[in-house]
């Protein structure tokens, strides 16, 4: 399988997972998001969606892991830091939540967490 086949497969799975999420089938979406990041470990959207789905399923430690991967892949992404803060709050990790929230605030004001990152 070449890179474009992998990307096509990943994107089809991601679209299917989003459809599952839209109709409330979180477990099915979860499995497909997991497959997306297995196919492409650098797929930011897949990690972000995986984390949010895990949070909705109250699987908070796993959600935080996916959220951290999202912020590693795109350290200047406001949504990634906001979501990670929410995951920490839900898990009762208030200090970590405040740290993630402060990073989101820096980004919302036009700052950067990491210079020259995408």
Image (cartoon, rainbow, N blue to C red):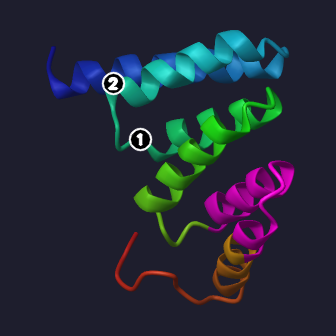
Q: From the viewer's perspective, is 40 left or right of 81?
A: left
The residue to which callout 1 is attached is: 43
Quick check: can you spot residue 51? no
* Residue 105, placed above or below residue 93: below
Question: In the image, what residue occupies the spot 76% across and 17% down?
Answer: 26
> Residue 38 lies in magenta, yes or no?
no
Counting from the top left corner in percent of width and height, residue 42 is at: 35, 44
Counting from the top left corner in percent of width and height, residue 108 is at: 71, 81
Towards the viewer: 100 or 3? 100
Quarter of the image with the N terminus in it: top left
Q: From the viewer's perspective, is 104 left or right of 2?
A: right
Towards the viewer: 90 or 30? 90
Q: From the viewer's perspective, is 100 left or right of 94?
A: left
**Mark 1 and mark 2 in contact (Cβ < 8 Å)?**
yes
Picture quadrant where residue 6 is located: top left
Classify 10 Å Cα crowding around label 1: few (below 14), some (14-19), many (20 and above). some
Element type at mark 2: helix
Element type at mark 1: loop
Question: In the image, what residue occupies the spot 73% across and 31% down?
Answer: 59
Quick check: can you spot residue 12? yes
Counting from the top left corner in percent of width and height, residue 52 is at: 71, 39
The secondary structure that dominates the magenta segment is helix
> Residue 92 lies in magenta, yes or no?
yes
Q: Which residues are magenta?
A: 78-98
The residue to which callout 2 is attached is: 39
């Amino acid at each position: 399988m070449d890179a474009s086949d992998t990307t096509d497969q990943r994107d089809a799975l991601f679209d299917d997972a989003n459809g599952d999420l839209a109709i409330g089938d979180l477990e099915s979406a979860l499995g497909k998001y997991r497959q997306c990041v297995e196919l492409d470990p650098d797929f930011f959207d897949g990690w972000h969606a995986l984390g949010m789905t895990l949070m909705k399923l109250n699987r908070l430690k796993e959600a935080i892991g996916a959220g951290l991967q999202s912020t590693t892949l795109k350290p200047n992404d406001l949504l990634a830091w906001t979501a990670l803060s929410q995951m920490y709050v839900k898990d009762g990790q208030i200090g970590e939540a405040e740290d993630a929230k402060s990073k989101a605030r820096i980004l919302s004001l036009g700052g950067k967490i990491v210079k020259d990152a995408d």
